[in-house]
Amino acid sequence: MDPNLQTLENPETQSSDEQTQLAIIAPPTASISLSLSAVLPTHFLLPPKISSLLAHHPSKVRIPSQAASLAHLSLSSSLNQPKSFFKSTPISSSPLQSPLFLGPRRSSDPSNAAGIRRSCIVWFRNDLRVHDNECLNSASNESMSMLPVYCFDPRDYGKSSSGFDKTGPYRASFLIESVSDLRQNLQKRGSDLVVRIGKPETVLVELAKAVGADAIYAHREVSHDEVKGEEKIEAAMKEEGVEVKYFWGSTLYHVDDLPFKMEQMPTNYGGFKEKVKGLEIRKTIATLDQLRGLPARGDVEAGEIPSLLDLGLSPSATLPQNGMSTANGSLVGGETEALQRLKKFAAECQAQPPKGAANDSIYGANFSCKISPWLAMGCLSPRSMFDEIKKSASRTISASTSKDGGSGQSDTGMNWLMFELMWRDFFRFITKKYSSATKQVDAAPATACTGALA
């Protein structure tokens, strides 16, 4: 037998010199496979993915990652200790030895990690809700950690140039209750709400630096001062290299679905109503059961929700006078109260017998649903209100049809309320048209009443 073959079949008979020579000639794959367990946690070494990679690339291994910062990690025969840039992540000083996801219920599939942000801030404004909130859902789905923030801007309080309160005590009290309810709803879903008193363009920059956020998520507003505030935020974040992502969620019809450009927005309600006739209303966005957790970096405190005194307002103005409570005193702010009122109103509408009158009427206290304050604060979305109205109307029409033998009519105020939501859309869109901080629109003045009944 060939002595060389005999040597290969019986490696224990090899001389020490031959063993040394074979060790030198051996490919570097052996050192790589031995070093993987020392560098990566065991949950990264999941067959058959790694084994298939080793089979095709013995000298270079690409490891599926759970974070964008690890997406291009590769190991070679000359691999040293992990780079120091791992320590810059907002999760921990050693991300390879701790869970990468802070949220209480998130998939750890590495294939979804490439497009996930490290950390973001959700800036709440007039959208104080967790239901039908595209901004909140997008931030939670696209980020590894999320910091919800609400700012009480001092410029919204105090006296105006005419000597009136910019924000009265009743509105401020309603807002404080709404912010408090929002914090509770976020906490139930594994998150929290950071509350600050200060200018958003200053507070958000400080928080973004503290947590290492790379994006701000917010809903757009329409008034002149709010648009100017958005431009200040964009300018401040641009200097810090932080992206600002805006969403739309304050109207029944989405601004991107309008069949005309904003410069061509009709200046009367009749024209607007005719333009949007038949326009499809987008579906409401499902509420997430769990949200991303707060960023570990920065150790940001949630902060206390201010009182009326903190905002420069007198609490005595909201107290009952002569033992009589005011109408505003019965309004409790917050998403929870808004949803309860909506269900109660829908039940009242459904319980009313059809009258077949030409003009529908609104049922409830003082012939009004009294939901406008919650819509204004964003505690309730117009689309969710429309959905509830549509469900109640369908049940009412169905019951009336079976009772009257097919000639059911609904006189529950549904049509009237639908037109009220359209009126609300008209005013917001016409405000957006004329409130641009950088461009003046040359058009005729808005005449809301012209053609209103057309």
Image: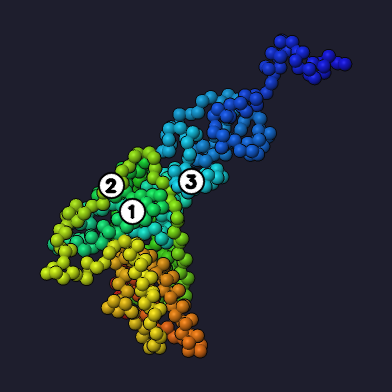
- Examine the image and state in which quarter residue 34 appears: top right
**Local crowd at mark 2 within 10 Å, few (<14), some, or many (≥20)?**
few
- Residue 274 appears at what percent x and percent y? 42, 77
Left or right relative to 251: residue 99: right
Residue shown at 45% from the left, 47% from the top: 104
Please give the residue where the numbered disc 2 appears in the rendered image: 303
So how many labels did they put on this image?
3
Left or right relative to 331: residue 414: right
**Local crowd at mark 3 within 10 Å, few (<14), some, or many (≥20)?**
some
Please give the residue where the numbered disc 3 appears in the rendered image: 116
Is disc 2 placed on a helix, strand or loop?
loop
Alpha-carbon span between mark 1 and mark 3? 25 Å
Left or right relative to 108: residue 297: left
Residue found at the very far right of the displayed protein = 1
Taking the image as drawn, is residue 426 in sight?
A: no
Left or right relative to 27: residue 308: left
